[in-house]
Amino acid sequence: MTRKITLAAIQFTPTDDVQQNIDRVAGFVRDAAAKGADVILPPELFCGYYFCKTQEEEHFARAIEWQEHPAVHQLSELAAELGVVIPVSIYEKEGPLYFNSIVVIDADGTPLGVYRKSHIPDGPGYQEKFYFRPGDTGFRVWNTMKGRIGVGICWDQWFPEAARSMALMGADVLLYPTAIGAEPQDASLDTAARWRRGMQGHAVANVIPVVAANRVGNEQGQVFYGTSFITDETGEIVTDMDRHQEGVILATFDLDHVDRARAAWGFFRDRRTDLYEILV
């Protein structure tokens, strides 16, 4: 039987009300599921405003243990009801440590575990190193009831070795929840196109569909540029959103066809690991 998977990305503007944001994501999940989605990706840190613009100690109070997080609990119930997979982005606290994390909820509502963002940015408007420790889980691929999914988080998307690692671990698709937009130090700098091209490159080099779900809109003066998209295994954008839309996009892929194409291109057959030198 042909293996098919329908992927969805959610794009919206969060408020700073946790429950309101969970409810909005739940509504988008219901919409995507009604259209046939199997895996539904909300954007990064959707439970509140993007708080990493500046360094403010009060924001550490936003972090919650992943097993206790209301978004994990409520979206687990919804995933079980609808039979869909939902990677849930949270600000995680574990003891004295703080992480930018994803909890992958399987289609029966089971939390499969946590991935902690490996690459942490630090720059004007995106001062994440103040809030997050670099992840300690390593890259992970999740064997869900709908397929094997690799999930990176925002800044991870710029690193080809992250995408390649997840592809080598057997991912059928790559997902990137994101919070990216204006660069406050340079109003003329617009990274939307290169942001897309970077992930399109991951799709090409690994012959794998890629989903990117971004925030959109103005959050207390910081504008997120949306432009969420889904590529096929050739890197072609098959569906996307603009800089203003809220909603969901979907695309369906034949995973057996993708597997054959990956084998035919030979990128994994011809890897020369004997020539690689890792500098530490």
Image: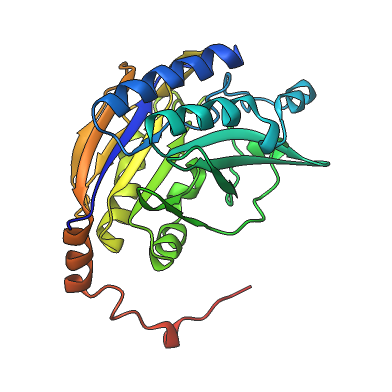
Residue at the spot x=42%, y=42% of the render? 176
209 over 100 or under it: above or below: below
Image coordinates of residue 219 in percent, x first then y, are: 51, 14
Q: In this view, does 25 lie to the left or right of 16?
A: left
Question: Would residue 82 be visible to someone looking at this image?
Answer: yes
Q: In this view, does 95 lie to the left or right of 222?
A: right
In the picture, residue 205 is in which quadrant?
Answer: bottom left
In the picture, residue 165 is in which quadrant?
Answer: bottom left
Q: Is residue 9 left or right of residue 69?
A: left
Image coordinates of residue 42 in percent, x first then y, are: 43, 30
Image coordinates of residue 272 in percent, x first then y, are: 37, 83
4 over 129 or under it: above or below: below
> The C terminus lies in which quarter of the figure?
bottom right
Residue at the spot x=33%, y=56% of the render? 172
Residue at the spot x=41%, y=57% of the render? 163
Residue at the spot x=21%, y=72% of the render? 263
49 or 139: nearer the eye? 139
Residue lying at the far bottom in this picture: please name it.
Answer: 274
